[in-house]
Image (tube, helix red, strand yellow):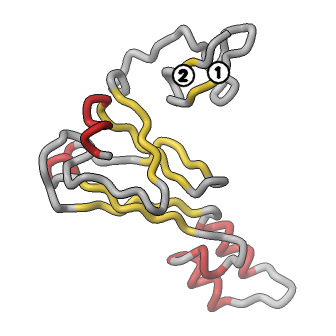
Amino acid sequence: MPVQKCPHCYRNVLPTKERKCPSCRQLIDNSPMDARAGKDLLWLSRNTRLAPICVQCGVPTEEKIKLQEFSTTRMKAFFSCLFRFRPQPILAVIALFRPELAVGEGYRMLRKVPCCSRCRKSNPVTIHSVDHHSFRIGILVQEELLDQLK
């Protein structure tokens, strides 16, 4: 059985005997008929440099938006600071704004991607998937823009 791209999670996978994706457990043969059609996953690592074109529509732009992902949630960091052996209320307040500072094992992944003002308002860029092991953020972009962005 060859490696295939899952139409649901956009990962290259080796399907199971039941033709399911081992990553998202969806059937490989069922293609989603929604706004994700014609899109592909673009992984953004720490040193990824993108061309100055909008990731949504392909229009040249110098504007960028920030995408960030925390390894710990703000509330988890908040409560872990409050209910320690020796509670630290000041860290709990910091955890609401910067959870990676309050919880030692936490980290923040921040990526800046080009996005024009029109797409920012009508069709904002969202994080599709996160690879915490490789510190990468995956976003969905139009298939025809993949080569232009890199």
**Residue 21 placement, left or right of 84:** left
Q: Amino acid at mark 1?
A: Cys
Categorize mark 2 by other alpha carbons within 10 Å: few (<14), some (14-19), many (20+): many
Looking at marks 2 and 1 on the same chain, the residue that comes earlier in the sequence is marked by: 2
Please name the residue that numbered disc 1 is placed on: 21
Position of residue 86 measured from the top left corner of the image (x, y, whole percent): 82, 90
The answer to whether residue 51 is above or below residue 35 is below
Rendering coords of residue 147 (x, y %): 30, 37
x, y percent for residue 6: 54, 22
Q: Which residue is mark 2?
A: 6
Residue 117 in percent (x, y) is at 15, 55
Identify the residue at image location x=20%, y=55%: 52
Judge from the rendering whether residue 39 lies leftward or rightward of residue 22; answer left or right. Answer: left
The residue sitting at 40% across, 31% down in the picture is 40
Callout 1 environment at 10 Å: few (<14), some (14 to 19), or many (20+)? many
Secondary structure at numbered mark 1? loop
Q: Is residue 46 left or right of residue 134?
A: left
Q: Nearer the viewer, residue 67 or 60?
A: 60
Q: Quadrant of the N terminus?
A: top right
**Is 45 drawn above or below residue 148 in the view shown?**
below
Residue 140 image-quadrant placement: top left
The amino acid type, in three-letter code, at marker 2 is Cys
Q: Quadrant of residue 110?
A: bottom left
Report which quarter residue 122 is drawn in.
top left
Q: Gap in Å between the C-alphas at discs 2 and 1?
A: 7 Å
Instruction: Establish if 5 lies above or below 2.
Output: below
- Look at the numbered discs 2 and 1 and tell me whether their residues touch, using CB distance below 8 Å: yes
Q: Secondary structure at mark 2?
A: loop
Q: Is residue 32 left or right of residue 13?
A: left
